[in-house]
Image (cartoon, rainbow, N blue to C red):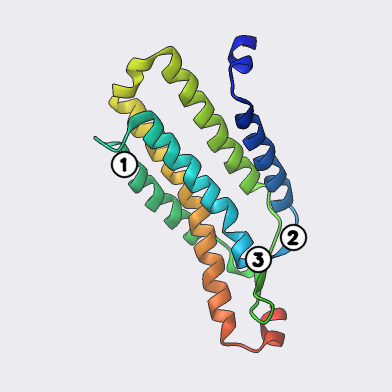
Amino acid sequence: MTQLFSHTPLYVWAILGFLVYRGVLASRTRELSLRKLCVIPLVMLVLSLTGVVGSFGLHGVAPYAWAVGMLAGTALAWKLGNPRSITAFPGRGTVQRAGSWLPLILMLAIFCMKYAVAVTLAVAPAQVHAAGFVLTVCSLYGVFSGIFFGGLLRTVQVYRQAMGQPLQAAASH
């Protein structure tokens, strides 16, 4: 186990630290600009896509499994997302989202999965051709990214709806 962690590049631990930091921030109700709100969904998208491309390439079922997972995760987040937990302030260009530990859990799940896949493929490189492994990993990467993306879409929808309302009406929700 010590060998495993000692051979992990330093930047991997920096990414983990960033994700934990952002996850703890997401646990608190706070007001953010739409630009800042896009950071984590984009980071998760990049992590999942680099996981797919880096491990399996863009050939075969890998990108399709990821895309199906992404659509499923987006739909799930859209359906289960609670628009009442979001308050938009179009005059300030911000939204307030209720705090949740779910982003931290999802970010750590993606990180751990990406790490586990890298270790698995280093120890058993033939897994890169195992259809069940590829489908499972790529689908899960897509689902996790889709959940973040669906949450972002839901927030943008609430913001856009509030743009047509006076600031006071948006703030009173």
Q: Residues within 10 Å of mark 1 (few under 14, many from 20)?
A: many
Q: Is residue 105 shown above or below 96?
A: above
Image position, residue 55 (x, y; %): 39, 29
* Identity of the residue drawn at 57% across and 59% down: 38
Q: Is residue 146 shown above or below 111?
A: below
Image position, residue 135 (x, y; %): 33, 33
Q: Residues within 10 Å of mark 2 (few under 14, many from 20)?
A: some
Mark nearer the N terminus (1 vs 2): 2
Circle 2 sits on which residue? 29
Circle 3 sits on which residue? 85
For the residue marked with disc 1, what is the amino acid?
Answer: Pro
Q: Nearer the viewer, residue 56 or 29?
A: 56
For the residue marked with disc 3, what is the amino acid?
Answer: Ser
For the residue marked with disc 2, what is the amino acid?
Answer: Thr
Circle 1 sits on which residue? 63
Q: Residue furthest left?
A: 60
Mark nearer the N terminus (3 vs 1): 1
